[in-house]
Image (tube, grey):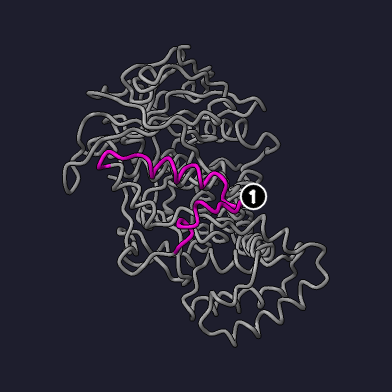
Amino acid sequence: MTLSIPFSNSYASLPPHFHSRQPAAPVAAPQLIAFNDTLAESLGIAPGPPEDMARVFAGNETPQGADPLAQAYAGHQFGNFVPQLGDGRALLLGEVTDKTGTRFDIQLKGSGRTPYSRGGDGRAWLGPVLREYVVSEAMHALTIPTTRALAAVTTGETVQRETALPGAVLTRVAASHIRVGTFQFFAARGDTKALQALFDYTRTRHYPDVETPNDLLSAVIDRQAALVAAWMSVGFIHGVMNTDNTTLSGETIDYGPCAFIDDYHPDTVFSSIDRHGRYAYSNQARVIVWNMAQLANTLIPLCPDQDKAVEDFTTLVHSMPTRIEHAWLTRFGAKLGLSNPDPEDRALIEDLLTLMATDGADFTNAFRAIATSSARDQFSDRNTFDAWETRWQARIASEPDPRALMARVNPAFIPRNHRVEEMIQSAVAGDFAPFHRLTAVLARPYDDQPDALDLTRPPTDSERVRQTFCGT
């Protein structure tokens, strides 16, 4: 069977200054590493022979119906505004509509230079491609909104970073690649006509019930508040929450220097480029509010009464911490078996987190142990834990089935940083077995998998990953 992708494109119909059309740059010798059959089936994509899929997903062959383009956008990077960024190493091949009628982008990442490359090579090396494949699919299995991975290929070429590294291309699937930075691109140019076209397109694609910029801002705030609370509930640190990495769809996007916490501490930072901790674990809730304020600024020109828009948008942005708090309480309450937590439960949750931070307890294992057995062995200060557990047992006494709820929301398996790094090093050496094993285990994060208990073990000091890096 020949690879078949039922493209039905819409972003390409937007005005020319929204994007730059171009094909991907061919590579020397593409080989397929992985193809996500389950995702493909849901998108109506029929696989073909591995060699055919390798050519398409490397960019050597443009499939019928595709309309490749690089999207334009701007963004605040670590608080500094850059008026033109754009897809410097990615191409939107086109869009498909799944069985529910939902539209998705199919994008090649690492497909060569574009007009937005800003001197970069437009390529990706194998490590970040496999990291994004593994972590994005793990996030999907954790039921957290995310872009997904359809395929990964090696290119048969090297990419020069600090050293020469094997090249690769990721095929990413997203509800869309519309970012806060996309709106900023046109707002910075005073292009109200383009802003209106982008607003109309975004509303049609993601928020059909939205009518006004005020409505759109409120809807995006809701999704982003829920997203960040979900991240925090599994110990995820995005690492680079720039406005160009904040989607209007409310999906997690860009798995560059991301990481999961091992031993819990709220100020944890992994990203090598986050030198001042702007995007530390505990700062994510504050940063997303700041990002939504930047979105609000771009929507003001679309409002007939701009003074009133400023007042309304200010109220909405100021309401966001309360929305995040509610989503956070719901998520963490469920982790402790509370089906309907109230504000007074925050102290119970925070006291446990404080004990974990003081004790150096493993975030994932401690919550999983509370859910499935006794967590006492997860703590060295057992007297303090015993006192907390007594309070918790009293609180859940009236809950109908707290253990079942906890088992559903406290994963046994996450993409631990040291396991991801081990997987990458094995792949660089030509062994993809750890990649395939990690992908399979993380597809069932809430299941007990006795043959994979080694993947639940926290790192030793020698295994600990202290910094993560983006791929550019």
Q: Tell me the residue at 59%/66% (across/down).
A: 367
Q: Write down the region rendered in magenta.
A: 428-457
Q: Position of residue 330 (x, y in %)?
A: 69, 61
Look at the image and tell me whether residue 269 can be seen: yes
Q: Is residue 41 left or right of residue 12?
A: right
Q: Is residue 366 left or right of residue 127?
A: right
* Amino acid tagged 1: Ser
Q: Is residue 294 left or right of residue 239?
A: right
Quarter of the view holding residue 316: bottom right
Q: Nearer the viewer, residue 315 or 424?
A: 424
Look at the image and tell me whether residue 319 can be seen: no
Q: Position of residue 57 (x, y in %)?
A: 38, 25
**Above or below, 338 relative to 23:** below
Outermost bottom residue: 383
Q: Does the magenta portion include 437?
A: yes
* Disc 1 packing (10 Å; few <14; some 14–19; many ≥20): some
Quarter of the view holding residue 16: top left
Q: What residue would you read off at disc 1? A: 218
**Above or below, 37 relative to 389:** above
Our reading of the magenta stretch's main secondary structure is helix
Q: Position of residue 192 (x, y in %)?
A: 49, 36
Q: Tell me the residue at 27%/45% (across/down).
A: 472
Q: Does the magenta portion include 90?
A: no
Q: Position of residue 116 (x, y in %)?
A: 30, 35
- Secondary element under disc 1, as helix, strand or loop, is helix
